[in-house]
Image (cartoon, rainbow, N blue to C red):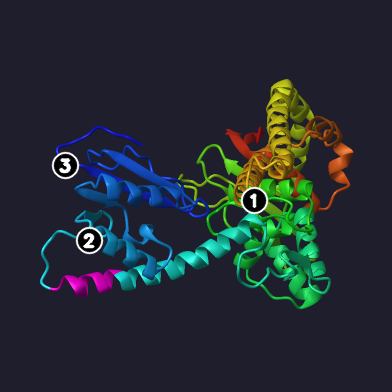
Amino acid sequence: MRLRGSFMKIFAYTYTDPLLEPAPDPTTWGWELDYIYQDLGKRSQRQQLFNDCKTEPPDCLVIRRLEELGDTVEEVSLHLTELQAMGITLIAIEQNYNSSQNSLNPRAELLKLLYEIQRDQRSRRIRTGHARNRLDGAPPPGKAPYGYRRGKGKYTIDRTTSPVVKDFFEHFLLYSSLRGAVRYIAKKYGKKISVTTGRRWLTNPVYRGDTAYQNGEIISNTHLPIINREEAAQVDRLLRRNSRLPPRTASAPRSLAGLVICHECQSHMTVTRVTIRNQEKEYLYLRPISCPKRPKCRAIAYQEVLEQTIQAICRDLPLAVALINFPQLDAVKNSFIEAISRQQEILNQLSTLLETGVLDTDTAKLRAYKIRTEISTLQAKLATLPPVNLLSVAQAVSIPQFWLDLSEAERRFYFREFIRQIEIIRQDKVWKLQVVFIF
C-alpha cells in the first residue's frame, strides 16, 4: 500500500491473525510511510517486504511488535539479523524498540525482548487453539455446566443431573421466584446451590443449546438444549420484570408484594399480618414502608386492594393491549426473522464456495463463525419482543373468575407479567387505585 513519501524512506509491516484480532487501520500509524505491507493469516507480504528491501532498501522499517516478524523466536531472530545486515533501522512502536539507538547492553536488551516474544507466542498459540475450537463450535475449556458433560467436540446432556436443572427452570417459570426454585431443588434433590449460582443457571446460554465464549460471542444451536427458545424468552422476561421490584419481593408469598406504592408519600407498601390472640384467623394489610408524613399514611386491607386490582385488570387490560401497535410490532419481528433467514442462506452457500475453491477452509470457517454469531445476536433481539399471543392472553385474563381460581403464587406470576406498578390514590378517608401496565 503506497502512501505519501517523506525525506526518509520508511516501510511498515503488520501481521494479523484473523482468528484473534481485526486488521489494523493503515491510517493510524502516525508516520509518513512510503509503503505498508499487510499480512492477514499468511506471510506472503513479509516475503515481498524482504525482497523489496534487497533491491530498494528503506531507511527504516516500522512494526507494532517484534513477534510480527515470525511465528517462532528463531524466525524472528533470523529476520532481525537480515535487517541488521541490510543496515535498515527497525522500530517496534508498541515495545519502544529502536535498533539504531545506542544502549549500554544492546544484546541483553534484545535477549529480554526475545524472552518476552517466546512467552507471548506461547500464549498466542493457546489462544489460537481456542479460537479454532470456536470456529468448529466446540465448547470452551473448563468443566461442563451442571446438567451437561463434555462429549466429542460439544456438550452432551447428562441424564443423571439434567432433570435437576430442568425442574429448576420449570419451578421458576411456574412461580417466577429464584429463591423458591433454589429451595425447591435443595428439598427435592438435595442439590444445594446459592442464589447467585441459580441466577447464573437462568442466564447461562448453554442450557438454551448455545455456546458462549470469553470474548462475549455466542454461537446458537451447538448442542441439545435443556429449555426451548420460548421458555428461555419467558425466563428473560421474568428476570427483567423481577429486577424492577424491591429486593426479596420477587419470591414473596403474597401476589401484590412489591407492586403497590402509595401515591401520597411515594413509599412502597409492604404486606403485614395481624393476628388476634387465641384465634386462628389472620388479617392482612398493606402499609407504607417509609412514609415521611405525620401522621403516617394509614394501612389498607390487603383483600380490598386485591379485589380492586382484579377489577382494574379486567376493565383496563384489554384497552391497554388494544392500544399496542401490533402491525408495527409484527414488522419489527418480521425484519429480524428476514435478517436471520438471509444470514442462514449465506451460511448455506459457504459449502458450495468451499467446494469450488472460491474460499479456503480457514476463511470459510471464519466466515461461518461470524455469521453464526450474527444470527445469535438477532435471535436474542427477537426474544426480547413481547409474545405474539399477547392479545389472546389479555382476553383470557380479563375474566374475573380466572383470577379467583388461582392460588396466590399463580396470581403473583400473572400480576407481574402485566403490571409495572399499582398506585394507591388517597382522597380524604377513601382511596382508589390505578394499575400501571408494563406496556
Q: Can residue 248 be seen in this view?
A: no
The secondary structure type at the circle numbered 1 is helix
The quarter in which the C terminus is drawn is top right
Mark 3 or mark 2, which is nearer to you? 2
The numbered dot on residue 84 is 2
Determine whether label 3 and label 2 are within 8 Å by CB. Answer: no
Q: In which quarter of the image is residue 317?
A: top right
Q: Nearer the viewer, residue 58 or 137?
A: 58
Q: Can residue 351 be seen in this view?
A: yes
Mark 1 or mark 3, which is nearer to you? 3
Left or right: 319, with 293 as reference point: right
Amino acid residing under circle 1:
Thr
In the image, residue 381 lies in the stretch drawn in magenta: no
Amino acid residing under circle 2:
Gln
Identify residue for label 3.
8
Extent of the magenta region: 105-113
Q: Distance between the residues labelled 1 and 2?
A: 37 Å
**Position of residue 92 measured from the top left corner of the image (x, y, whole percent):** 26, 56
205 lies above or below 158: above
In the image, residue 106 lies in the stretch drawn in magenta: yes
